[in-house]
Amino acid sequence: MQLPPLQIIAHIENDYTAKFAIPRQSGLVESVESRIVFTEAYRNETALRGIEGYSHLWLLWIFSQAIRDTWSPTVLPPRLGGKTRMGVFATRSPFRPNPIGLSSVRLLGVERSTPRGPVLRVAGADLMDGTPLVDIKPYLPYTDSHPDALGGFSDPVRDYRLEVVFPPALLAQVPPRLREPVVEILAQDPRPSYQHDPDRLYGAAFGGWDFRFRVRDGVLTVVEVEALK
């Protein structure tokens, strides 16, 4: 059976320019706004008729930085320390037979008259800047929400957060619009899952800035900030 190829309908634009700063799931960092800009063939206002009636949307997208020719039936989930193998279909790993991602985002608004056609403003995305989207669907609370659902092996780490110490003198160097988001991002622990050296200096790029930090006993301390050129 010959299947039609997927069409890239849009790309996302935001301040997530490096993978280590991206939240591990959608909805964890609500203070970062993203913009969904449609490709030329899909810049049609009619296609968005009625979308303002929804508070949340599902985004289907391509793991464009994780495309491989082969696949593995097991992967190493980061929140299990990167040492325990689980079945790929029991995880949200980007390394899948088909590199398709699924995210739930909050719809902030629709800009209908821009030089690039209609643009969607959303919050809570976990996509890198420039990620291609293949579909957008409305989130339906009466069928998509399951408060009693089981979270499998991810449940024990769902509330994992670091305490963030961001010295005021360093925070003052950061543009005001980035201050709340970067603290939320750092609290999610952007370190590689297999690295836990308390003396190591780590870095996370976000919004044109590089934030360097150390982590000891569950406390992340920012020690340097630098504007990227």
Image: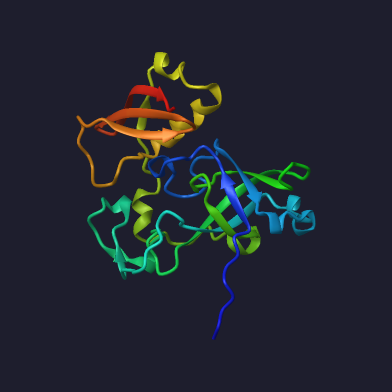
Q: Could you tell me which quadrant the C terminus lies in?
A: top left
- Quadrant where the N terminus sits is bottom right
Q: Quadrant of residue 210?
A: top left
Give the answer, above or below, for where 204 lies relative to 57.
above
* Image coordinates for residue 178, horizontal then vertical, percent: 51, 28
Residue 196 x %, y % = 22, 39
Q: Is residue 98 above or below residue 198?
A: below
| Residue at the far top in the pictured view | 169
Identify the residue at the far bottom of this view.
1
The residue lying at 57 percent from left, 71 percent from top is 5
Q: Is residue 207 above or below residue 105?
A: above
- Classify residue 193 as left or right of residue 96: left
At a point 39% along the width and 65% down the height, the residue shown is 96
- Return the residue nearer the eye: 96 or 6: 6
Judge whether 180 appears above or below 42 on screen.
above
At which x and y percent is residue 212? 33, 28
Left or right of residue 183, residue 122 in this image? right
